[in-house]
Image: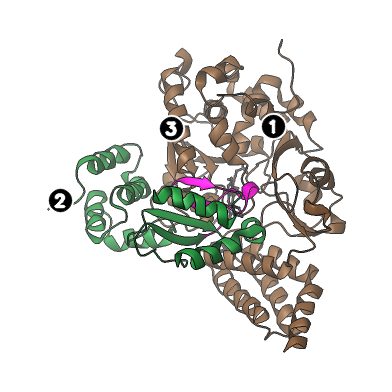
Chain colours: A green, B brown
Amino acid sequence: MKFLTGETEKTIKELMGKYEDPRSALLPILHTVQRDYGYISKEAIEEISEILDIPKVEIKGVITFYSMLREKPAGKYHIQLCRNVACYLNGGKELVEFLEKEYGLKPGTFTDNMKFSLSLVECIGQCEIAPAVQINDKFYGNLTPKKLKEILSKLEG
Amino acid sequence: MTEKLENKIFEPLFSIEGIENIEVYEEHGGYKALREALKMKRDEIIEEVKNSNLRGRGGAGFPAGMKWSFMPMDDKIEKFLIVNADEGEPGTFKDKYILSRLPHLLIEGMAITAYAVGIKKGYIYIRGEYEEYARILEKAIEEARRKKYIGKNILGEKFTFNIVVHRGAGAYICGEETALIESLEGKRGHPRLKPPFPANAGLYGKPTLINNVETIASIPAIIKNKGFWFASLGSQKNGGTRLFGVSGKVNSPGIYELPMGTNLKEIIYNYAGGIKKDKKLKAVIPGGISAPILKADEIDIPMDFDSLMKAGSMLGSGAIMVFDEDDSMLEVLRIMINFYHHESCGQCAPCRYGTDVIKKLVDKILNKEATEEDIDLIIQTAQSIIGKTICPFGDAVGMAVGTLVRKFKDEILDFLREENAES
Ligand SMILES: Cc1cc2nc3c(=O)[nH]c(=O)nc-3n(C[C@H](O)[C@H](O)[C@H](O)COP(=O)(O)O)c2cc1C
Ligand code: SF4
Ligand code: FES
């Protein structure tokens, strides 16, 4: 049975048409699948392998190479916290401690309600507003534990 | 020319509300340079870029006009233009201001470049995290297409050029130009051996011109005001202005557009507002984390490619990271080596093992188990990576780590002694 259907399938076809070589659409396709399904499942990999005619192991190799791509679900709100110099020396470290204390959220894990997940990442290009995080596609900066809590509370609704 | 010549390129535009929309951009002279360029001979455009002394803003500072002239001029050959918007070098955040606020300046620069070099297809490789800015670019491209600034028969001329925005997915090494090409071909981002250089065999094996966002966004101003004007803004052999991004312990972190060759001390104290809480300055990384660190007494220096090279560092991406007396250089070292260890693509043994060995030695220091010999071993290991790898990542590890440990060896020794005294 087909796994990638509807809008996802349509987008994949469009993406392939943008490039001289359809294989170039691999990253955008993986982004699309992850956006629509939350992660890139075994079934998805199998189907992409057929569509693009590249071996499954190669697709897996690509997924593991790039830190944004995942084969497992993440929280509804995925927090990427910057652990590089500007952020970590300007309060980022305290944010990590706060997330663990207040939410039981350790890097690489979820909160129990699957609302939030956390990963520590390298510089996300927001050093002038350090410490910074990215939550899904949005950036937040000049954070303190208090400000971060406000943001997360709002998202939690 | 009736318009007044500004001595800055980006800042006057940044301050215009709505400039990311094509109508506003046009009202402020947008796409005029493209119209002018289409009336020029192609080699005249390249000549202007050569005269401008524009050097690559991505890191290495290679003269842009020279790079363009390495491209084959034969139009029967399929060629590509890639704009490097990967912006992964820690400390760097300048390109995002162009991508998000001045997408049309970038598009206009790309169209002029493509016309001059005879290219029909351009890619903007943007880091995956910049999803929001990728959407802004897509919208701007659509607007430009509707107005015939890109697409088929641009402004009625026999010139066709299309742009595709391609998002990366989180890998620092994909900022390196050949890793970027591999990534754009749908593969893991492993740098290629050079030669061949992209100008001969790049994307899909075809001649490819790769330039940074800030480099390409400088092109419209060069066409409008001429190359010599641009050259006159900067210092010798370093044309134009630069978007310096200042972060860390300064009162006003942010981007500052200043002439190439502006004094680093002046940037920190006059523009970025000096050190927070009037603390003492300890050190500065002047060009992104890969640029060897400068001590407080080494910052009386013009910020251009040649002056920093002479001082044993690098202008790199123009990202200035400022540390005060409270910042631990050992912590900076820890973050730095974790970064390199995590981001090495693993192809070359010296880079893969070297980062691993250094990381273990740094952990040993942090666990208070190290001796002075271990510190020296870091310096030796760092040195041994330099010049022995496929891509400049290895050199960056060696230079950045080696310099930091050499310059702050006393601080690391003090840390070890302090801890010993406590136990
Ligand atoms: C490890 C590594 C990472 C790099 N990252 C970037 C980057 O994020 N953005 C960029 O424009 N150039 C980056 N570069 C430089 C590119 O390889 C290339 O020189 C540049 O895009 C050329 O454009 P320019 O001549 O306009 O500077 C990187 C180089 C290396 C070795
Ligand atoms: S130097 Fe490092 S990052 Fe560059 S190709 Fe070799 S292993 Fe990969
Ligand atoms: S160091 Fe955190 S965003 Fe750059």
- Under mark 3, the amino acid is Glu
Q: Give the magenta range.
A: A121-141
Residue most toward the left?
A1
Q: Which residue is mark 2?
A: A2
Identify whether B260 is placed above or below B111: below
SS assignment at label 1: helix
Q: Is residue A67 left or right of residue B402?
A: left
Q: Secondary structure at mark 2?
A: loop
Hey, which quadrant is residue B363 in on the image?
A: bottom right
**Quick one: which residue is furthest to the bottom in this view?**
B423
Contact (CB < 8 A) between labels 3 and 2? no
Image mark for residue B138: 3
Relative horizontal placement of residue A135, taking residue A75 as reference (left or right) = right
Q: Are marks 3 and 1 in contact (CB under 8 Å)?
A: no
- Report the amino acid beneath label 1: Lys
Q: Is residue B355 above or below residue B202?
A: below
Image position, residue A149 (x, y; %): 51, 54
**Mark 1 = which residue?**
B50
Query: Which quarter of the image is occupied by the N terminus of chain B?
Result: top right
Q: How many marks?
A: 3
Tell me which chain the residue with mark 3 is part of. Answer: B
Discs 3 and 1 share one subunit: yes
- Compute the Cα span from label 1 to label 2: 55 Å
The type of residue carrying mark 2 is: Lys
Q: Position of residue B341 (x, y in %)?
A: 56, 68
Residue in front for this viewpoint, B134 or B171: B134
Chain holding disc 2: A
Q: Can you give x and y, in whole percent of width and height, for residue B234 in the image? A: 78, 34
Query: CA separation, marks 3 and 2?
Result: 30 Å
Instruction: Choose top left, top right, bottom left or bottom right for residue A92.
Output: bottom right
Q: Are marks 1 and 2 on the same chain?
A: no
Residue B192 or A60: which is nearer the viewer? A60
